[in-house]
Amino acid sequence: MPRICVLLAVLLIVILPGGRTASQTEEKTPASAADAKEWTFSASAYTYFVPHSQVYINPNFTADHRRLHLEARYNYEAKETASLWVGYKLSHGEKLVVEVTPMVGAVFGKLKGIAPGYLASLTYKKFDISSQGEFVIATGDRADSFFYTWTELGYSPVAWFRGGLVIQRTKAYQTPFDIQRGLFAGVTYKKLDFVVYVLNVDKSEKTFVQAIVFNF
């Protein structure tokens, strides 16, 4: 496991802008400058308000360049646990747009393991379905192996608003429900997204999640 973590960390350093490679000692050409602009990034923080539990934050960072997808997560698979991911993005369609990104990640911290995973989305006009999932294969106690998923069905009546349904399956915190279902609503202002999720809406004890996403 440590070797996998080191390899993924080196990959992040080498590929991301600012990483040192032999070719970077040469003067940047106009073509390479254009390539650098094709990088897109996203930084997000999901704050969980769980009944009878301590509030915690799940930060995430992604970097995309053409088909390459890199990602780092913390407090996602489990608390005090991080993961590093690399994936390959596939897309098809214009009106009905389908994107699928198969990934593999290294999980380390309180929970250790390797995880095959995916990102997937389907968009048609004002409707969209997005999902991310992973199966953590724990290298310690095999009972810690688990399938995680976060799936949204969204509708955007206007460009700055999106709302819909959400489903989550997690072991990051204790819950009496194997599958948590809920609602969400969010607004977009320039490069920022503000979203509020309410899980277990039909139960007396609800979980609230507040998300802030910065795309750049």
Image: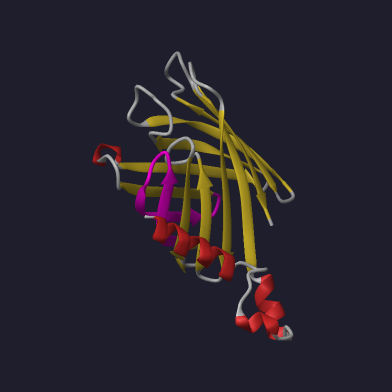
- Image coords of residue 175 (percent x, y): 38, 24
Instruction: From the viewer's side, name the closer residue of 134 and 17.
Output: 17
Instruction: From the viewer's side, name the closer residue of 166 and 18.
Output: 18
Position of residue 61 relative to residue 168, above or below, is below
Extreme left residue here?
Answer: 142
In the picture provided, is 209 more to the left or to the right than 171? right
In the picture provided, is 63 more to the left or to the right than 27? left
The picture quadrant where one finds residue 55 is top right
Colour option used:
secondary structure
Q: Residue at x 50, y 55 (%)?
A: 124
Instruction: From the viewer's side, name the closer residue of 41 and 173.
Output: 173
Instruction: From the viewer's side, name the closer residue of 115 and 87.
Output: 115
In the picture provided, is 38 more to the left or to the right than 88? right
Give the residues in magenta. Answer: 97-126
The picture quadrant where one finds residue 181 is top left
Q: Residue at x 46, y 22 (%)?
A: 201
- Residue 210 among those drawn in magenta: no
- Residue 104 among those drawn in magenta: yes
Classified by dominant secondary structure, the portion drawn in magenta counts as: strand
Asked whether residue 216 appears in the rendered view, the answer is yes
Q: Can you say which quadrant of the picture contains the C terminus?
A: bottom right
In the picture provided, is 63 more to the left or to the right than 117? right
Extreme top residue here?
Answer: 204
Extreme front residue here?
Answer: 2
Asked whether residue 98 appears in the rendered view, the answer is no
Q: Residue at x 42, y 17 (%)?
A: 203
The picture quadrant where one finds residue 155 is top right
Q: Residue at x 63, y 69 (%)?
A: 19
Q: Can you say which quadrant of the picture contains the N terminus?
A: bottom left
- Image coords of residue 194 (percent x, y): 66, 39
- Image coords of residue 213 (percent x, y): 64, 45
